[in-house]
Image (cartoon, grey):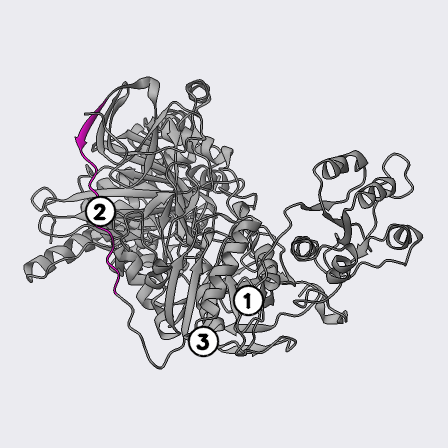
Amino acid sequence: MEINYQEIGFKCGLEIHQQLDGKKLFCNCPTLNSDKEADIKIERKLKAVAGEKGEIDIAAQHEMVKDKLFIYESNSQDTCLVEYDEEPPHELNKNSLETALKVALLLNAKIIDEIQIMRKTVIDGSNVSGFQRTALIAMDGFVETPQGKVSIQTIYLEEESAQKLEDGTDFVRYKLDRLGIPLIEIATGTEIKNSEHAREVAAYIGMVLRSVEGVKRGLGTIRQDVNISITDGARTEIKGFQDLRSIPKVIEHEVKRQIDSIDKGKKLQKEVRKAEQDFSSSFLRPMPGAHRLYPETDVLPANVPKKYLEELKKKLPKLLSHKTEEFERKYGLPNQMAKEIIAYDNFELLVKTFSKIDPFTIANTLVNIPKEIKTRFNMDSSKLTQKDFEEILSYLNEGKISKEAILDLLIKKIKNEKIDLTHFESVSDEELENEIKKIISEKPNLNIGAYMGLVMSKHRGKVDGKKIMEILKRYAK
Amino acid sequence: MIPELGDVVKVIAKDGVYEGILMPRPEILEKGYTVIKLDNGYNVGIEDSKIEKIELISKHKKLDPIKYRKAEHKKSLLTVSILSFGGTISSKIDYKTGGTYADYTAEDFIQMLPELENVANLRAEKVMGLMSEDLAPEDWQMMAKRIAKELNDEEVSGVVVTQGTDTLHFSTAAMSFFLKNLNKPVVFTAAQRSIDRGSSDAFFNLLCAVNAAAKFDGAAVVTCMHGTSDDKYCILNRGTKVRKMHTSRRDAFRPINELPLAKINEDGKIEILNNNYEKRNENKVSIHDKFESKTALIYVYPGIDADIFDIYIKKKYRGLVIAGTGLGHVPTFNPKHTLIKKLKELIDNGILVVIAPQAIYGRVHPYVYTNLRKLSIGLNCIFVEDMLPEVAYVKLGWVLGHGDKMEEVKKMMITNYAHEINERSDEKNFLY
């Protein structure tokens, strides 16, 4: 079913969460995903408490009913009393704030004069304190994308939550090394036009983030949540995307789920859902209400003097998108491809690693071949992982396959089929020429198209068709 | 109309328009910003110099007070009184200063912890709303009166007292001396994390404290706070043998020089660890709450200037507790810093000098070193064994309040009234 996004009243916004490097936001612990063995174990319970207006939040109530025991584990070198909620927070980390402000400026946002740190009630145990410290640092920015301008409504600087290890029937186990890592949250407006546009916007914001020093890189350091609604549906927030490329799929699934429910006359609830491996999503919790924020009184507000901001503006890094031009020049890529390839972090590294492959082929493998697989073969190329690409490119680099084999091999990867390289062995020019001569001598007087068919039937996916034609033209009449 | 705090306003500034609720800003902070709570719940501070106009959108709506369900009296349950004296356990945010302030009444405790209804029939009263650091001996006197009234009520099985943590161990020491012929448990509890957060230790502490007040078989003033950082059990520590040993941890209250009297488990089960306490009885509690306000507690340190003691002579103090180094020393032979001459002057002026251990753990000793003998034999200072300096201060004020003659007062200082002195130093009593 093709989705007509305009007709269904599609509204979609993104929330992008990016971890920062350095020290934690409110203590001097390191920001790492630690592999040290836990030597601290704490067991706690949380209560739902009334908010500023005397009402208990609905999301909070939902969790309270569960009455769970929270078990926190960590290594004492990675965490301190602040994470255990046994010591008040230290001052707001100035380096994190500076990094976040740079990102905000690059997203054309208006910086808040005096930043107020808030407590956001979270009682699923992922914050030992029962709340997440968070601050609105900038508003009203925008990004330009090929499909149009998208507003950046809000930019927050906040604490990362603890990592869940185990969800038991009456307990939840968390690891605390991640708790308190500085996190930038960027929320876009709902101008996103369709599922593919959502991916583009996410990719662009990811590029801006990676342009700034102090931003963490690598798996798990950036997460995207998508907010979706359609006419007569209900706003859902989908969390836990593994990969940027899966955004369009997950959106399409959610839109179809909502359309289905509306058709069946079901009333949809505002809710938070979790993205699953197969791009569907499952219920996580009801959407939190509006009463979950109150001031963090243990930390002073941070004011951002004009003079400091002016200095910061002068120090802003060049956006990676300025690299488009550089890539065009350096790697001889066409403009469109250069534009698209800058979203791929690993491109330059791949060019370096696979020095025998020309950069265009690498860019083509990353950008265009997956698109072709999707449109021509109607297959889901977002299933392809970084590793899959690296594996196939390494075969090409070692001369084990020809570049014509890339598409077929990637398809095999999607289908999870075993790869037997003998079917894809490349044929040398000399071998090919001998073969063609042999065919012509065996079956003389055929037209050139017929010869082409014969050669291709044997070498499809191994040899460039153009090359066959070239040789045929020399030997056939 | 000029917008007031709590009103929904539109702030028109040079760089744009902000809409939200006008919020108070801690007065102590630098001026020049207006704080607005935006629709998304976040507060932002806008520089006043760029604000052109603040328009009123709608007036602040007063919220209906929350209606409390009246607790029903269950015949099967015992009755516990909760007396609230303020502190973090009963505090919420003060938007004027940004800090937390004492406001919750004892009824709020019942509202926020419905489990309590299955533990005991509750009576609750907010007596005062002071933070710990503001409590003074006059407040202890009022505290003793209110507690005694409850203890002498036949229906009441025990009393829970809530206050701030910082000086909790001063209050428990005071109550240990002030309340004579104690008949039931007086259980002090508090919180290290404010009650407006889901992780507050107040809930668990309060649950354990009500259990202890109802079921503990002792007639003793005790603290009931987390035993560890986990929400697993609380410990009951004797009011004269407990001290806040950490600024912020929830298990900050540790027994000093003895074991806790008991553990209170999550399910209310009481496990006795130290049986050395008086049992519940039918006594009528009387109050002995005179307190000599001209009593001081002084911490000795290298480089101390003897002249700082002059003020105590000038202001006609009657008693001084000196938290001495090690076994109870003060600078002795250092000509620049010796206190010996000055202490003699104090004593000659009728001031009683008491020596307590600055090391907190362990016992002072009057004779081990020559310098100690100068204090004990030479000057007749009173060495108070393993009594905590804070307890010695409270006791000295109380003793001076009730005795006149120096010899009588000296004797009272080393007489055990509330297990403030342990005769034995058990090996297991260090760093529990």
Residue B267 tag number: 3
Secondary structure beneath label 3: loop
B420 relative position to B337: left or right: left
- Identified at 52% across, 71% down, the residue is B185
Q: What's the magenta bit mostly, secondary-structure-wise?
A: loop
Q: Position of residue A281 (x, y in %)?
A: 25, 59
Q: Are marks 2 and 1 on the same chain?
A: yes
A409 relative position to A84: left or right: left
Task: Report which quarter residue B362 is drawn in.
Answer: bottom right
Q: CA distance from mark 3 to mark 2?
A: 37 Å
Q: Are marks 3 and 2 on the same chain?
A: yes
The amino acid at mark 1 is Ser
Start-end of magenta stretch: B54-69
Residue A169 tag number: none
- Location of residue B219 with respect to A187 vertically, above or below: below
Q: Quick one: label 2 or label 1, which is nearer the N terminus? A: 2
- Say which of B50 and A181 sits in front: B50
- Say which of A418 and A305 sits in front: A305
What residue is disc 2 on? B63
Among all residues in the image, which is located at the extreme front?
B405
Q: Position of residue A399 (x, y in %)?
A: 45, 48
Q: Position of residue A312 (x, y in %)?
A: 45, 22
The chain identifier of the residue carrying mark 3 reads B
Q: Residues within 10 Å of mark 2 (few under 14, many from 20)?
A: few
